[in-house]
Image (cartoon, rainbow, N blue to C red):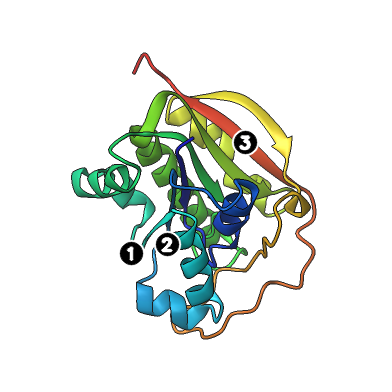
Amino acid sequence: MKILCVGDGNMSFALALATLFGNDAPGLVVTTDASERGAKKMYGTMEDTVEALEASGASVVYGMECETLGTKSGSATLRGRAGGSNFDRVVFNFPDAGVGKVGMLSVRAQRELIASFFENAPKLLKSNGELRLTMQTGAPYDKWNVEGLALKARLVFKTSVEFLASEFPGYEYCDTPAEDAEDVEPSADDLGRCVTYVFAANVEQ
């Protein structure tokens, strides 16, 4: 299975997948919008995590933002890392535009980030592939209007399932840090109830 993990901050989710795959994950590609230097500065464990991912056969791509996913160069890079094919799943966990979570400016920025993902990620899916977006529930996340944005992008809603971090060994959620942050620690806050939305691309587009 070919899986693309988008914006996986400390990459612990991708590493959890690699672990579940028996450390044999040549079809796993992980992106971050940070540079390699910036990512290693932000997360003290990043170097070890990347080393473990690459040892499993997974591939890490730095400096890849949502709007870059669907560009000619961006998609070529990602497909190249996956052996030249599109992906069975494209996963984006806890999207965060990094502008806080209070006020309409924040809501607008979060919606724009998710809309960009919904616009660009389907270009990397196989015809029977799935987009998976995981979110916290309740305020302010309900205002981000995930299902409405998906409908606008002409995605097909398939299902939603509860996301349980405990099912992914070693996964550690981190809030989106400031650009100049160093050695960001996993968030001590309870994530609360989280949901993974599953969408398919509209093949009639």
| Residue at the disc numbered 1 | 63
Q: Can you tell which quarter of the image residue 191 is in?
A: bottom right
Question: Please, is residue 12 above or below residue 185 in the view?
Answer: above
Counting residues from the start of the chain, the first of labels 2 and 3 encountered is 2
Give the x, y percent position of residue 203.
Answer: 39, 17
Q: Which mark is residue 32?
A: 2
- At label 3, which amino acid type do we have? Tyr
Q: Secondary structure at mark 1?
A: loop
- At label 1, which amino acid type do we have? Gly
- Foreground: 139 or 177? 177
- At label 2, which amino acid type do we have? Thr
Q: Which mark is residue 197?
A: 3
Q: CA distance from mark 3 to mark 1?
A: 25 Å
Q: Is residue 82 visible?
A: yes
Counting residues from the start of the chain, the first of labels 2 and 1 encountered is 2
- Tell me whether the residue at label 3 lies in contact with that at label 1, contact meaning CB atoms closer than 8 angstroms: no
Give the x, y percent position of residue 153.
Answer: 42, 31
Question: Please, is residue 141 above or below residue 201 in the view?
Answer: below
- Tell me whether the residue at label 2 lies in contact with that at label 1, contact meaning CB atoms closer than 8 angstroms: yes
Give the x, y percent position of residue 185.
Answer: 64, 78
Q: Secondary structure at mark 3?
A: strand
Instruction: Identify the residue at image location x=45%, y=84%.
Output: 180
- Foreground: 52 or 114? 52
